[in-house]
Image (cartoon, helix red, strand yellow):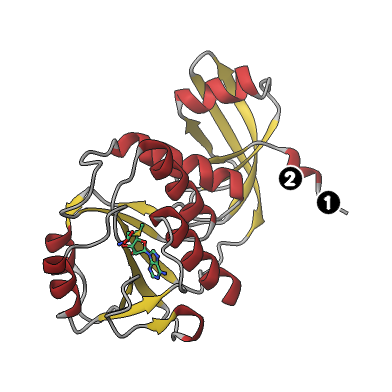
Amino acid sequence: MVSMTITLPRLYVDADLIAGRDVGLSPAQAHYLRNVMRRQRGDGVRVFNGRNGEFLATLSVLEKNVATARIEKQIKQQPTAPHAITLLFAPLKKDRTDFLVEKAVELGVAALQPILTHRTTTRRLNAERMMAQIIEASEQCERMAVPEAYPLQDLTQALADWPRDVPLLWCCERDDVPRTPLMVAEIPERFGFLIGPEGGFDEEEARLILSLPFVQPISLGLHILRAETAALTCLSHVMLRS
Ligand code: SAM
């Protein structure tokens, strides 16, 4: 029987979750509960913070732009994720970036690292808006932790900062590069996927990427996928294999 709690609004909070304590909710969450979900003081909600699991809570205050929830009891333990995946992606046209971010969250990414490459067309990214999207998608898909979102970085800097002991799986659509099909590639516990912009990586970037010992070029098949499709494909593959 589906537990009734599944109908309760699910909210991400950063505070520690301890039974009996009140946690403050954001003005946006107060607005959502009051005006969208039509909830009232005394109604139940579910809260999670990515560290202590998920708890039932009761709205102890719910006014215009102000809300607090009284933590009642834990209903889900905090799981350990089978993989810690960082997705390095070049910002795309607005709707496509929105789609890529939302799907990456649903498909279990641990961190999003937007990168600027020579052919990246969208050179700016609203970090606050992206974080709000990430939290909303995490609440909706019932995942138990909210991915990290790192600041937009040049590709060269992101590669220079990349930990040398963490594999970086380069989604490479070029058939002049020896690649491992993702279907048969080994999936490490902690790794990154690197995906290029609409126009792909240029020669100079491809040479730099290929020169790095922690990079493993992988193929997602014969078709040239859009960047957001490539992201969806590789993350789905890992999620379904876990
Ligand atoms: N260079 C491509 C072209 O000639 O049209 C455009 C790049 S593609 C639209 C965007 C990104 O998706 C690529 O940089 C790559 O990271 C990834 N990608 C697309 N198809 C792929 C495939 N079959 N295998 C691996 N990665 C792929």
Image mark for residue 2: 1
Ligand 1 appears in which quadrant? bottom left
Image mark for residue 151: none
Residue to which mark 2 is pinned: 6
From this viewpoint, is residue 242 visible?
Answer: no
Q: Residue at x 37, y 78 (%)?
A: 218
Q: Residue at x 58, y 22 (%)?
A: 61
Amino acid type shown at disc 1:
Val
Q: Is residue 70 left or right of residue 229?
A: right
From this viewpoint, is residue 170 visible?
Answer: yes
Mark 1 and mark 2 in contact? Answer it, CB < 8 Å. yes
Does the residue tagged 1 have its C-beta within 8 Å of any atom of ligand 1?
Answer: no
Q: Is residue 111 left or right of residue 99?
A: left
Q: Look at the picture and state if 23 lies above or below 117.
A: above
| Relative image position of residue 183 (x, y in whole percent) | 51, 81
| Relative image position of residue 47 (x, y in whole percent) | 58, 43
Amino acid type shown at disc 2:
Ile
Q: Quadrant of the rendered structure where residue 237 is? A: bottom right
The residue nearer to you, when weighing 43 against 209, is 209
Q: Is residue 108 left or right of residue 162?
A: right
Q: Residue at x 48, y 31 (%)?
A: 24
Q: Residue at x 38, y 41 (%)?
A: 131
